[in-house]
Amino acid sequence: MRGKTAVPIIVAGLLLMLLGIGQRTLWAPAETVTAGVAQDAQSAPVTVIEPGARGDADGPVDVTVEADGPFTLAIGRTSDVEAWVGGAAHLSVTGIAGETLSADHTDGEDTVPDPSGSDLWVSEEPGDGTLTYRWSEPVEGDWSILLAADGTAPAPTQVSVTRPNDQSTPFALPLIIGGALVVVLGIALLFVPPRTRRGKAGTEPAEGTRAHARRSAQAGRSGASSIAVPGSALVAGLVAGGSLLGVAPGMATTTPSATPSASAPASTGSSTDSSTADATPSSAATGAPSAGSAASGPPVVLAGQLERILGAVASTVADADAAADAERLAPRVDGAALDLRTGSYAVRAKDAKAAVPVPVAADPVLLDMIPTDAEWPRTIVALTQSDDNPVPQALLLVQETPRENYKLTSAVQMLPGSKFPSPPAPGASGPVPLDDAGALAKAPQDAVASIADFLTKPTGANAGTFEENSFSEAITEFQAGVVADPGNKAANITFTHQAQGERTQALQTGDGGAMVFGYLTHTYASVPKGAGDSIDLKGTVYRSLTGKDTSGKGIDVNYGEAVMMYVPPAGSDDKIRVIGAAQQLLSAKLR
């Protein structure tokens, strides 16, 4: 009877174990699953793979693209990709339904620019034929993939996404453990001794049995009530005490303690303190949200992008400087920076002794100011200093539209003894209104107009607006010296500085002020006072520029002046500080 009971139990346990092992091996889920776009998907000049195509994958997924020719795969923020696509026709890969990637076609423009090399992309990969790309999120946020050929030919539509599969087998371990316990129970039953039975009627009991009977009788007469049953203690230990089928492995019963554990309150107190600390912002966290937070989002340019952008700008400028060719600046330089370098090339073409422009340094980056606002135009600042630059150089870069790259619009040297404004929290800097003071002591455009007025009339209304600085001192002292020069008594000399309001840019600083970049045109006019008087140009750079030794009508000399200023917040007792500047002779024209 014991075999008839134990063997089925052992077999059942083995089957449970095999079932659990099979779930881990033979029937284990695949490591990855792949979904692809339907073959009949309508093509367009752009294909966009949206975040939904990743499914529920938290880590990297593999994107495989098949095409008939070369194409570009670019990674960018979802909002940036959408802005770049704009009104163009495109195929959107939106999500996963089983083994198929759902895709929607949107009508629009039939062509787009070639997306390769755009500053919007965090990274890009060239493809030709088949390309498999490991897609991971650079930082927290929504990221998309853009596919395009040359902007005219159809973009690839044969796209598949391979992501990790859920390989969890929640019932495998319980089946293996439960089956093992059942096998142990069956084996234990095989070794449990059978219960002793009485002899047949009419037979003489064995001597041991008679002795046991005598002991039992004596026990009965003495009032004992317990009767020992051979084997019962072992069965009780297997079934009741161990509860092989009813208690999870490793669990143990506990007995109440009269004194509570001292560690429990301490642990609870620690948990409460930690929770409070996490929920309450520290003093360092007040102010603008940090980059990547829910309130700010990621900065519009990541570190790798900034490095690539600065490298492209510096390379373009170096190439143009070497050739003294302003046309080579067009892809990466605009605004004041373009005016100053174009003027430098023109002067050097006529006067070989003229100073060469200061090189643009791409690295090292001492600090940067990058906004999180996703709108355009976008403005960023990088402070760099290379071995060729005796002082740090502030570079202002502007991206006007999503499909344009960043261009250098101002490059100024820090003035000796000046202090760069404290940048705001990472990713929190952004543009400020140019014609409205708002929270500033003076509107940015008004600040630029004020420095122009001060340089024109050093003793005028703005004489007390600015802190002393080497740029203003050099210009005002030069102007005063020219007027006081006895050799210029026969000439009427005027100096005029004019603010170019449309060239003004401003970004907020960490203390509520603003860093303002402005551009001034400076005209130095010298006109003879009377008939027969003339302006002597011999020995000056103006002789090289005009080709004349003298002028009986006069001369206008034009300079460009780029300035970087700090405007304090409203209510501050601080004055406006000029912290960086660059001046360049542009031209000289006879009247």
Image (tube, grey):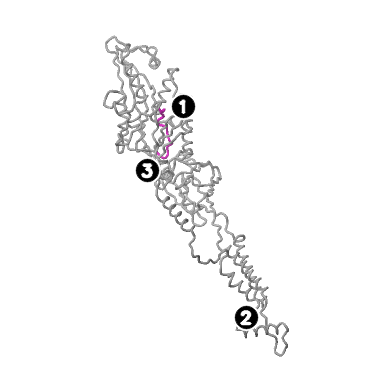
State which region is magenta.
401-414
Q: Position of residue 218 (x, y in %)?
A: 65, 84
Is 165 rendered above or below residue 322? below
Residue, disc 2: 227
Residue that mark 3 sits on:
287
Who is closer to the viewer here, 516 or 542? Answer: 516
| 3 or 1: tag closer to the N-terminus | 3
Viewer-proximal residue, 516 or 282?
Answer: 282
Q: Would you say the residues marked 3 and 1 are in contact, meaning their CB atoms lie under 8 Å apart?
A: no
Q: Position of residue 422 (x, y in %)?
A: 39, 36
Query: What residue is rendered at 35% in x and 22% in y?
Result: 473
Residue that label 1 marks: 389
Q: In which quadrant of the rendered image does the C terminus lie?
A: top left
10 Å neighbourhood of mark 1: few (<14), some, or many (≥20)? some
SS category of the residue bearing label 1: loop
The answer to which of marks 1 and 2 sits earlier in the sequence is: 2
Gap in angstroms between the C-alphas marked 3 and 2: 82 Å
Toward the bottom, the furthest residue is: 202
Residue closest to the far top: 532
Image coordinates of residue 347 in percent, x first then y, are 41, 20
Q: Of 70 and 84, which appears nearest the observer?
A: 84
The amino acid type found where label 2 is placed reads Ile
Sort mark 3 into few (<14), some (14-19) or many (20+) by Cα contacts within 10 Å: few
Q: Is residue 109 visible?
A: no
At label 1, the amino acid type is Asn
Q: Residues within 10 Å of mark 2 (few under 14, many from 20)?
A: few
- Residue 219 sits above or below residue 529 on the image: below
> Is 224 displayed left or right of 295 in the figure?
right
Gap in angstroms between the C-alphas marked 1 and 2: 104 Å
